[in-house]
Amino acid sequence: MSVEVTVKYLGDPEKEEQFKQKIPTLFEGVEGHWEVKVLGDQRNTIWELTVNGPTHHLKPVKTLTGLGNIPYKPSSMESALS
C-alpha cells in the first residue's frame, strides 16, 4: 500500500501537516497505490477531496462545506473517505 497525499490551500500549515499524517493511516491494509488530494478554500468554508485508486478509477470528487468559523478537521476527512 502506498498513498500519495497532496494538501493545499487550507491556510494553516499545521492543519495541512495533520492531514498529511492522518490520511495514510486511513489506507492501512488497502492494497495498491492511491492518490488523495485535499484542496481548500482561503475562507475555510469549502474544500475538495479527490481520491484516485490503483486501477486509475477516480472516486468522485467530494466537496465538503462548513461554516467560516469551523476549521478543517482530519475527522471530517476520515468520515468522507469511509
Image (tube, rainbow, N blue to C red):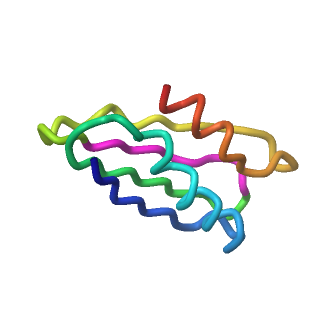
Residue under the image location 53 percent in, 61 percent down: 20
Q: Is residue 81 above or below residue 56?
A: above
Q: Main secondary structure of the magenta part?
A: strand
Q: Is residue 21 above or below residue 67?
A: below
Classify residue 6 as left or right of residue 80.
Answer: left
The furthest residue to the top: 82
Classify residue 35 as left or right of residue 72.
Answer: left
Q: Is residue 9 above or below residue 34?
A: below
Residue under the image location 45 percent in, 50 percent down: 24
Region rendered in magenta: 44-52
Q: Position of residue 69 (x, y in %)?
A: 87, 49
Residue under the image location 20 percent in, 43 percent down: 32
The furthest residue to the left: 55
Residue under the image location 48 percent in, 32 percent down: 81
Q: Position of residue 74 (x, y in %)?
A: 66, 46
Q: What number of labels is visible?
A: 0
Camera-nearest residue between 51 and 31: 31
Camera-nearest residue between 43 and 77: 77
The furthest residue to the bottom: 13
Q: Position of residue 5 (x, y in %)?
A: 41, 59
The furthest residue to the right: 69
Q: Is residue 49 magenta?
A: yes
Classify residue 20 as left or right of residue 75.
Answer: left
Q: Is residue 43 magenta?
A: no
Q: Position of residue 38 (x, y in %)?
A: 49, 54
